Image (cartoon, helix red, strand yellow):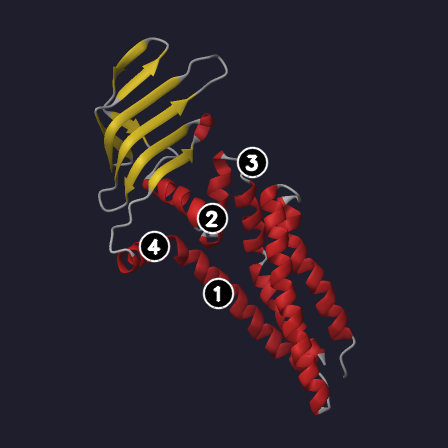
Amino acid sequence: LLRSFMPIFVCGALFAFGTAGLREATIKKYLPIHESIQRKLNNNQEWLPKDLWVRGPNSQRLHVELFSPETPPHVLGLELFKSSRNGRDERIWADSASYTDKHWSLSGGLITDAEGEKTLDVLSATGFAPDDLSRAYFARNRPLDLSLSEYENLLKYDKGHRQAETYMWSQRMKPFASLVLLILGLSSSLHFSRSSSREGLARGLLLCALFFVTELLLQDMGVRGALSPLIAGVAPVTLFAGISLWLFSRSPS
């Protein structure tokens, strides 16, 4: 039986990992375009994310009131907070800023630290580039649509981001989940009589639906802190992998 279905498993693996690779390579580029088109079609307005918070290196936090991703990207109401253990805190704010040559050119920029207040014209964009602002918007509004690399970037400066860590592990398991569902469906449908085949097909569909329910439930528990993000992202696939292999071993030869 395994030799007979090996071509199906090989093709399934190629499709699963190929689709995952294609998604990883394209989602970052086309997700903002998709969001912009949706806003224009549904609400007849431009996509202008508001009230964004971004974490950067050394516990820095950036807040912008309005972000326009159109070239050149610019923001309104920029505030940057820097804190350190030795008490040398800084606060930078500006009425507006535009992004050019990997830095923000500030309009009405001011910096306040222990030495007082002074003007500031240029702000380094390390950790606060336009891509980071877009990522912050999608992490808040469409967290399931981010790519694996985007989840890793969120965790780079925010180790306690449970949602990003949970979905990162879940995203890593997606190609294996496709193979598990393939084996699960085949194992449930392998019967010789017509009536039992129909029952097997219904049972296979039910088990596949149960997989997605389990996945959503464990992901929610991982995001809320009831489960480790690693367990929440990996457990559904490993659990149903065991079930699918057990059913496949009991299938008629």
Q: At x 67% / y 82%, what residue is drawn? A: 4
Mark drawn on residue 149: 2
Left or right placement of residue 139 versus residue 211 in this view: left
The reply to whether dot 3 and dot 2 touch (C-beta < 8 Å) is no
Residue 35's disc number: 4
Between disc 2 and disc 1, whose residue precedes? 1
- Residue 131 is situated, as x and y percent measured from the top left of the image, at 35, 43
Q: Residues within 10 Å of mark 3 (few under 14, many from 20)?
A: few
Q: Give the mark nearer the N terminus: 3 vs 4.
A: 4
Quadrant placement of the C terminus? bottom right
Query: Residue visible at 50% across and 61% down?
Result: 20
Specify which label sits upstream in the sequence, 1 or 4. 1
Question: What's under tag 2, amino acid-wise?
Answer: Ser
Cα–Cα span, label 3 and label 1:
29 Å
Q: Earlier in the sequence, mark 4 or mark 2?
A: 4
On the image, the x and y values in percent for residue 43 come to 28, 55
Give residue 81's quadrant in the image: top left
Depth check, mark 3 against mark 4: the one in front is 4
- Residue bearing the label numbered 3: 160
User: How far apart in space, not on screen, are marks 2 and 1 (Cα)?
Assistant: 16 Å
Q: Is there a contact, CB below 8 Å, between mark 3 and mark 1?
A: no
